[in-house]
Structures are given as C-alpha cells and as structure tokens.
Image: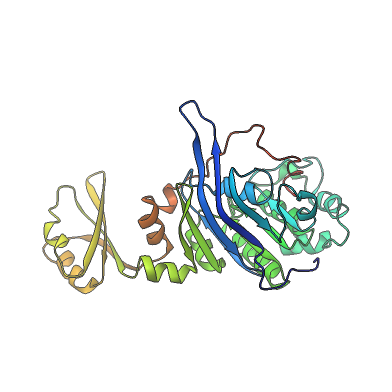
Amino acid sequence: MAERSPSHDPVILLENVTKRYPGPHGDVIALAGIDLSVRPGEIFGLLGPNGAGKTTTIETLVGLRRPTGGTVRVLGYDPVAQRDEIRKYVAIQPQHAAVFEQQTVAELLRVWASLYPDPETPDTIIDRMGLSASRDVRVSKLSGGQRQRLLVGTALISRPRLLVLDEPSTGMDPNARQELWDAIRAHRGAGGTVLLSTHSMEEAEMLCDRVAVLHKGRVAAYGTPQDLINTHAPEREVHFTVPVGTDLARLRTAPGVSHIESHDTGGNTRVIVRTSDSDAAFGLLAGPLGARHIQIKEAGLEAVFRLLTGVSFHEAGDGAQPPTGHDAAQPAETNGVMA
C-alpha cells in the first residue's frame, strides 16, 4: 500500500459541499451543504433513503462530479483539479461496472493486477473473496453475488489507500457477505480506509466504525452506530399485531410510550411502540389489547434511520442517479475502478 498521510489528517474532508442540477422548474438540489470527515484507517458508512445524496456524494469525492460549492479534499487533494494524483491511491467499486465478460475470474484479475505497480496477487484476491471454486469460470457465467465479490476484488487488487464501495453486499448470501466483511476488515487492518454506502442495517452496525445518515442532501446524523442509537433511539421497541380497528388509545397514554406506528396488513394491524417502560406496555398488550406476535427489541440503527428519514431501511431504495451532462468530471472511472 502506498505511503499514508499523517494520521491527524482526514482521508476525506467535505465542507459545506453543495450540488445543484438545472431542472425544468428550477434547480434540483442534490447536496444542500454536506460536512463530513473520514479518518485514516476507518470503515465509514453512508446511509440514506432514495435521493438522499449518497451517490452524488460518492461521485463528488472521487472526482466524477464537480461540486457547485464548498470544499472537497481526498488525501489532501482536490479530486477534480488533481484527479491524476488521487487515482493513484483510490479505488471505487460501484454496484454495476463493465468488465471483460468472456475472461475467467483469474484472467480478469491478472489483467487488473498488470495495471498497478505494486498489486495484490490475483490468487490472494481470489482466496480473500471466496472465489476459489470460480477461478476458471467466465465472468458472464457468475451469479450476481459472485460478480459483486469479483468487482470488490478488482478494487482491492491495487491495494488502495481509500477503497470506495457502493452497496457491496448486494445479491450476496450470508456466507459470501461474511467473506466480504472479512476482506474489508483485512484491508482496514493493512492500513487502508473504507467508505461504503449500504442499505443493510446489519452491515452498518457490524462493519462500520462510524456512519452518516443523509437526508434531503444534508447530514442528518453522524457518529458511531452506538452513539447514534444512544442519542436518537435509546428506548426499546415493542412489535406486535392486533385486529384491524383495535383501539390503541390506552397504549398511547401508557407510561414511557413516546411513539406509535401502525400499518394495516390484511385483517391485522402491525404496530411498533417505542417506550422506556416495556413492562408496562407488555401488560396492556397481553391483557386488554389481546396482542399477538409480541416482540421486544433493543433499538438499533433501523430505529435511528426511521426517526431521521421517515422510512425504513427496507423502503429506502437505491440512491437516485444524478443527470449526466457537462458537469461530469473527466476522465470517468475505468470499468468501475480508478485506474
């Protein structure tokens, strides 16, 4: 891995970054003043619903989009004006990338390795990404999860100081996802820094040192997963079902209850209660309300996400793609990896 910047300097620094696109009814605001700092050796997660600004943030910090205003620095460089410098040290794996479909996994990784002065060996990447059984399989024959692991492998092979991943575990089964997480942690252990976007609550909680929740082009919250939970969702959640039309008035006035959500599903109503006194709530549920399928859960990032954005992780969707045009910085990424 190339020489690292001093530990006190952020790998990524965004200060009051804005991005606007012209639209038929006025400017479309993609970023409304993003402030963000990512430390060396950190796994940092970007969370947010559809259109929150995740994709624009990533493309801006790797030099694929010019910000309308504000300051962007990656490893101390301006990613647009000094793109030739940062592309030596940064690799990006988007969700979808063009690769040589008729090459085998091993052949493709050998080509990738030939592009860099001090690459990881293809065999190491194959083992690390759990692709040993697929090393001689053509890329066109890979499953969606295998293809995702290969794309991450092409980004890792350059041993980048900054690895940028866009929803890297999409399409992976639990075993493959664990192998991916181990590979990301190994990269961090070797001195690398990782920025990833994800819609997986488990991935964010298990993998990320810190996260930022983006909403409507701004950072709605920023910190370690546990700090965000303690600050925004310190209570427990009680999940249960009742028949449609059940009167929840007594529950709304129960001790410790701060929030109730309800959604009709067929003949039942699915209810989520946030409370600091789950015992009192449970007494009402088991008695007067006749609730079923009762679960008491410690609040997690899902609750934080829902509180800050108004949607669940599962409803968040993919990040909105900004329009293409003259503001797209050149050259663009080469087959998904900054070469």
Residue 138 drawn above or below residue 222 = above
Residue 13 drawn above or below residue 42 = above
Query: Residue at the location (79% across, 54% down)?
Result: 85
Q: In which quarter of the image is the N terminus?
A: bottom right
**Residue 125 percent across, percent down from the top left:** 77, 61
Front-most of 57 and 321? 57
Query: Residue at the location (67% across, 65% down)?
Result: 193
Q: In which quarter of the image is residue 43?
A: bottom right
**Residue 148 percent across, percent down from the top left:** 66, 51
**Residue 153 percent across, percent down from the top left:** 73, 56
Q: Quadrant of residue 324?
A: top right
Using residue 157 as the reference point, say whether residue 310 is left or right of it: left
In the rendered view, how is the structure colored? rainbow
Name the outermost residue toward the top.
24
Using residue 221 as the reference point, say whether residue 8 is left or right of it: right
**Residue 186 percent across, percent down from the top left:** 69, 69
Q: What is the tally of numbered marks visible in this picture?
A: 0
Front-most of 142 and 249? 249
Query: Residue at the location (56% across, 66% down)?
Result: 208
